Amino acid sequence: MIYSCYYGSYLAAVAAALHLGLMEEFDSGEITNLPYFGNLGKDQWGKLYFVGEDKSGRKIYIMGSKKAGRVVEKALKGFAQIYNMEETSVVFVDLLPFGNLFFAAGCFMLRRLNFKRAGTFFLMAGIRKSFGKLKDLVESIKKSV
């Protein structure tokens, strides 16, 4: 299971934590202490980072895919097909649609302007706004795979 967002270290880290049961509710302190949260940059796009194994034994990864999530998903499914794996053996979840204006502003302030305090404030506001939908998505994925 691969959770992916633009950088791979914000929404993907939160989704992976939700999947693994590392958090239940929105808590900005918990979020900033998640593995890989805010620690992956441009040079790490496309790399998989192992976050943990869920209760069913599925390995959970995060990945930054910029805006190429759909292409990456098709490529992964193609590789699964080449190696005669079931299509569900590789589950790729593109979280780019869960971003919002607050989230984008926070990322811009953090990554481009290096405004840590303001950037973190807007980033957390964006994650808080998307948190319920993100949590519902993760729960539905866990039930379906």
Image (cartoon, rainbow, N blue to C red):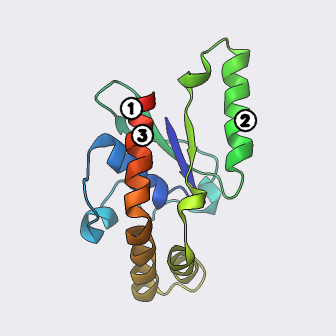
Residue at mark 1 to residue at mark 3: CA–CA distance = 5 Å
Q: Residue at x 64, y 47 (%)?
A: 46
What is the x, y in percent for residue 62? Answer: 49, 46
The numbered disc on residue 108 is: none
- The reply to whether residue 36 is visible in this rendering is no
Tell me the quadrant of the picture where the C terminus can be found. top left
Inspect the image, locate mark 2, and give the three-letter code of the amino acid beneath it: Lys
- Decide which of 89, 52 is in the foreground and name it: 89
Inspect the image, locate mark 1, and give the three-letter code of the amino acid beneath it: Lys
Q: Residue furthest top?
A: 84
Q: Residue at x 31, y 41 (%)?
A: 20
The residue wearing badge 1 is 143
The answer to whether residue 58 is above or below residue 48 is above
Determine the image quadrant of residue 109. bottom right
The residue wearing badge 2 is 74
What is the x, y in percent for residue 39? Answer: 46, 62
Q: From the viewer's perspective, tell me whether residue 62 is left or right of residue 33.
A: right
The residue wearing badge 3 is 140
- The reply to whether residue 115 is visible in this rendering is yes
The answer to whether residue 30 is above or below residue 91 is below
The answer to whether residue 143 is above or below residue 106 is above
What is the x, y in percent for residue 105? Answer: 55, 81
Q: Residue at x 35, y 24 (%)?
A: 57
